[in-house]
Amino acid sequence: MDRIELFRIFTRVVESASFTRAADTLGLPRSSVSAAVQTLETRLGTRLLHRTTRKVAPTQDGAAFYERCLRLIADMDEAENLFRRSASDPTGRLRVDLPSRIGRLIVAPALPEFLTRYPGIDIDLGMTDRAVHLIEESVDCALRVGPLSDSGLIARPFGTLRLINVASPDYLERYGIPLMPSDLASHFAVNYASPSSGRVEDWEWIEGGEARTVAVPGRISVNSAEGSIACCLAGLGLIQIPAFDVVDHLKEGRLVEVMPGHSAAPMPMALLYPHRQHLLRRLKVFADWLEGLMRGVMAA
């Protein structure tokens, strides 16, 4: 096994925090992964990893060596591709994670154009409303909508998504049309519960330049945008949703916008990726393409 391969195995163990997960993602026996790390430690004369029954973490020397390995691997990848294809034709596989509605409605239909433009790039596309752990799950980039936590990841802002308030005609016929946030006390909401924390989000609007919130009664809660829209269409309550999500329902009269002057603040959108990924040309071209695609959605 050559040194670059040893470096690749070591970095995957660090990123996965597990010999077993690293072996699974690399398609290697766990024994081979363990032996590769032991070989490196013997050659370098230092311990690279703290090993426990539950988790693997780099030592101080291991963390420094990890950063050096990332640069060496990236340089080698660029060198190997130098004469295989032109400099404008990146290659390799990208693992991408997207919110489910954005992935299904916006990105998937547009992917043929991207794959035709970049025939050397393959995409593993994940669509979920769960906040994936990029490093542990070996994801190259993830599109996130909403406030970001301090995760240590690189964030490339894409802009914001406009939020609107909607309900079905059937619901409005039964309960009336809310005109002001004070009217919400006599209405129901399809409450949205975070798929990560389970916390139900309050109803939000901007008034006098400040964000205001109120808890709206609801007989049902959901943990996905798909579920929220389906329940709203069924007449189960009001929802707050990105405008792009329901544009067709609005055009065809299946949903109606309410309280347009009392909408929530637009939601920030950003592409996240690990620090090491800034060297990957395939990620750069995908990020540029995705930002252009989402810009068209934000302008709608």
Image (cartoon, rainbow, N blue to C red):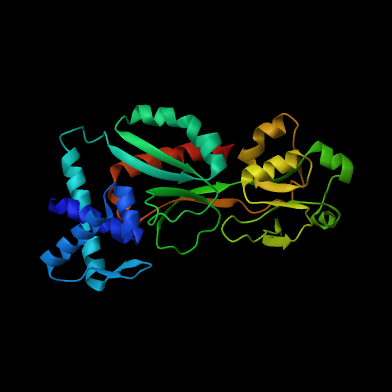
Residue 1 x %, y %: 14, 50
**Residue 127 seen in the current view:** yes
The residue sitting at 75% across, 33% down in the picture is 254
Residue 63 x %, y %: 26, 67
- Closest to the observer, 131 or 43: 43
The residue sitting at 41% across, 28% down in the picture is 113
Seen in the image, is 258 located left or right of residue 119?
right
- Closest to the observer, 191 or 49: 49
- Closest to the observer, 179 or 78: 78
Classify the position of the C terminus by image quarter. top right
| 206, above or below 169, in the image | below
Residue 94 x %, y %: 35, 42
| 67, above or below 60, in the image | above
Residue 288: name its quadrant: top left
Seen in the image, is 196 located left or right of residue 220?
left
Residue 186: name its quadrant: bottom right
The residue sitting at 29% across, 48% down in the picture is 26
Residue 24 x %, y %: 33, 50
The residue sitting at 27% across, 49% down in the picture is 279
**Residue 70 seen in the current view:** no
Numbered-mark total: 0
